[in-house]
Image (tube, helix red, strand yellow):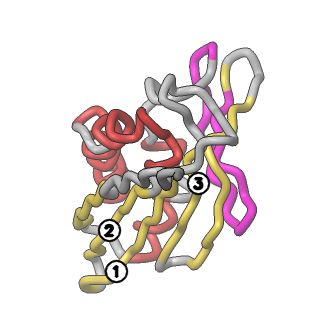
Amino acid sequence: MTQAAKTISIAPVRKTLTVNAPQQRAFDVFTEGMDRWWPRSHHTGETAMTKMVLEPRVGGRWYSVHEDGKQNTVGVVSVWDPPNRVVHSWNINATWKPDANITSEVDVRFFAEGPNKTRIELEHRNFESYGEQAQQMRDAVGSDGGWNGILDLYRKEAEAV
């Protein structure tokens, strides 16, 4: 008799923030303006990061460019619905290196709360692809050094005039 493999479900990381910016600006800064706010310390290259890019279309890459000229793909856009939503994969393994075999997903939604206020709801999910390291990765991206700190940098850029 065989025993079915046990499936472990890891809760998604969910973050909500409100920025003092119109919905379209909030979306544009998060996507096409990512290079202005993404922390230079958060990259997968072997040399310093010079640029972070999110290509604005379904199938577009999310990638970093480095001093040595190399590009490292972080993920691929699966939903592009300006100014409401963007979804992209996160193909980074537990040692913080690009890995097409590891696929979690980041879903970001933008809700107009007024002419100059937008609520952003981010959900980073599907940590199960990390296997035994799933909870470790969930904890890392859900921490102050993960999405908390990154979204604070985003907020500052979205609210800059």
Marks 2, 3: nearer the viewer? 3
Quote the CA–CA distance across marks 2 and 3: 16 Å
Residue assigned mark 3: 89
Marks 1, 2: nearer the viewer? 2
* Element type at mark 3: strand
Quote the CA–CA distance across marks 1 and 2: 8 Å
Image vertical order of residue 79 relative to residue 53, above or below: below
Image vertical order of residue 115 relative to residue 128, above or below: below
Region in magenta? 46-65
Look at the numbered discs 1 and 2 and tell me whether their residues touch, using CB distance below 8 Å.
Answer: yes
What residue is rendered at 76% in x and 24% in y?
70
Residue assigned mark 1: 111
Q: Which amino acid type is shown beneath numbered disc 3?
A: Ser
Q: Is residue 141 left or right of residue 28?
A: left
What residue is rendered at 42% in x and 34% in y?
132
Badge 3: residue crowd in 10 Å (few <14, some 14–19, many ≥20): many
Residue assigned mark 2: 121
Quote the CA–CA distance across marks 1 and 3: 21 Å
Look at the numbered discs 1 and 3 and tell me whether their residues touch, using CB distance below 8 Å.
Answer: no
Badge 2: residue crowd in 10 Å (few <14, some 14–19, many ≥20): some
Q: Which amino acid type is shown beneath numbered disc 2?
A: Glu
What residue is rendered at 43% in x and 54% in y?
7
Whether residue 161 is visible, yes or no, is no
Closer to us: 102 or 18: 102
* First of labels 1, 2 by sequence position: 1
Residue 145 falls within the magenta-colored stretch:
no
Q: Position of residue 157 (x, y in %)?
A: 36, 50
Look at the numbered discs 2 and 3 and tell me whether their residues touch, using CB distance below 8 Å.
Answer: no
* First of labels 1, 3 by sequence position: 3
